């Protein structure tokens, strides 16, 4: 008799900064001047700023790909791109900094759903809160209105600095150029195809709106894989066979009465 099935919890990581570019620049400058990995407390003391402010700024800089954790929890350092960004920032090279940030956002999995939202929106004027709602929903969160406002303002600030949106009050307009064939990409996972195995299990194949069109998410019950589309035909039979063998072994080695 089954005592309940364990399902694998899928963790979704998306950028949710709560401060904008002014704070990120403060964190980047502080780390660059400190010249070694530091915690928000180290930096707050060194640059005479609020610990809470520096903590949020470092987290946002990490979301932006300019900083990363350095070993132990709470210890930050600049990424190679962050080092370059800080150097250019110290020389007043604003346009070069914006290009680095733009590239980091477009290439980062943390921003994939945000970028997809902007691509799907096209030239349509959207409220920044619509983007926050979309991300809150995908993360399965229940944010307070204060948190929503902070994230909306942060998105607007960061995306505008990267040249990915135009901001007018609380409205944003995507500035992302959609390549031919990209416009049809779904913004959410939708079932595209279902195949029934010999055991009756359903294999669902999803197009990944957050990934390039040559990748797809595949669900085998509680097991989820993200693979290149061209390998799907090879991987599905292998995983299906493994699941069938596992199921058979479980029946053979089941609990003794």
Image: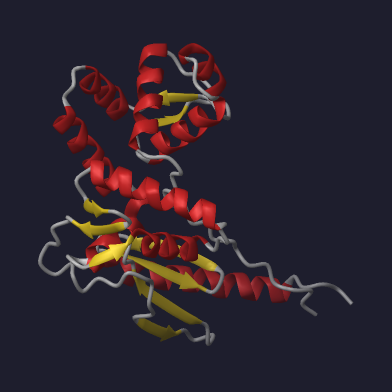
Inspect this view and state whether residue 47 appears. Answer: yes
Task: Please report the residue visible at 35 percent of the width from the left and 61 percent of the height from the top.
Answer: 227
Task: Please report the residue visible at 74 percent of the width from the left and 70 percent of the height from the top.
Answer: 253
Dividing the picture into quadrants, the one containing residue 119 is: bottom left
In the rendered structure, the answer to whether residue 55 lies left or right of residue 256 reads: left
Between 164 and 229, the residue placed more toward the observer is: 164
Q: Is residue 212 above or below residue 66?
A: below
Name the colour scheme.
secondary structure
Q: Is residue 241 above or below residue 46?
A: below
Dividing the picture into quadrants, the one containing residue 67 is: top left
Q: Is residue 17 above or below residue 29?
A: below
Between 134 and 195, the residue placed more toward the observer is: 134
Q: Position of residue 81 (x, y in %)?
A: 28, 29
In the rendered structure, the answer to whether residue 151 lies left or right of residue 223 reads: left
Task: Please report the residue visible at 14 percent of the width from the left and 62 percent of the height from the top.
Answer: 178
Q: Quadrant of the C terminus?
A: bottom right
Q: Position of residue 42 (x, y in %)?
A: 54, 16
Q: Quadrant of the N terminus?
A: bottom right
Check the image and name the residue furthest to the right.
257
Inspect this view and state whether residue 35 appears. Answer: no
Between 55 and 224, the residue placed more toward the observer is: 55
Check the image and name the residue furthest to the left.
180
Between 49 and 250, the residue placed more toward the observer is: 49
Check the image and name the residue furthest to the front.
169
In the rendered structure, the answer to whether residue 100 lies left or right of residue 245 reads: left
Task: Please report the residue visible at 37 percent of the width from the left and 61 percent of the height from the top.
Answer: 131
How many badges with numbers are in the image? Answer: 0
Q: Position of residue 245 (x, y in %)?
A: 57, 72
């Amino acid at each position: 008799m089954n005592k309940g099935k364990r399902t694998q919890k899928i963790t979704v990581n998306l950028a949710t900064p709560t401060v904008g570019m002014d704070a990120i620049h403060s964190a980047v400058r502080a780390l660059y001047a400190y010249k070694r990995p530091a915690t928000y407390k180290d930096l707050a003391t060194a640059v005479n700023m609020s610990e809470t402010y520096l903590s949020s700024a470092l987290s946002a800089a990490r979301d932006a790909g300019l900083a990363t954790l350095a070993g132990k929890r709470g210890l930050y350092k600049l990424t190679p791109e962050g080092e370059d960004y800080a150097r250019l920032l110290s020389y007043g090279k604003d346009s070069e900094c914006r290009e680095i940030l733009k590239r980091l956002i477009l290439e980062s999995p943390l921003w994939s759903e945000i970028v997809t939202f902007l691509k799907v929106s096209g030239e349509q004027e959207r409220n920044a809160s619509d983007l926050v709602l979309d991300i809150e929903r995908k993360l399965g969160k229940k944010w307070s209105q204060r948190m929503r406002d902070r994230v909306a303002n942060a998105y607007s600030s960061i995306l505008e600095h990267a040249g990915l949106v135009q901001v007018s009050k609380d409205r944003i307009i995507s500035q992302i150029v959609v390549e031919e064939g990209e416009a049809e990409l779904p913004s959410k996972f939708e079932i595209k195809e279902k195949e029934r195995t010999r055991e009756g299990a359903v294999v669902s194949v999803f197009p990944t709106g957050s990934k390039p069109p040559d990748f797809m998410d595949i669900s085998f019950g509680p097991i989820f894989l993200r693979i290149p589309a061209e390998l799907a035909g090879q991987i599905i039979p292998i995983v299906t066979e493994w699941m069938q063998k596992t199921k058979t072994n479980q029946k053979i080695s089941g609990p003794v009465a």
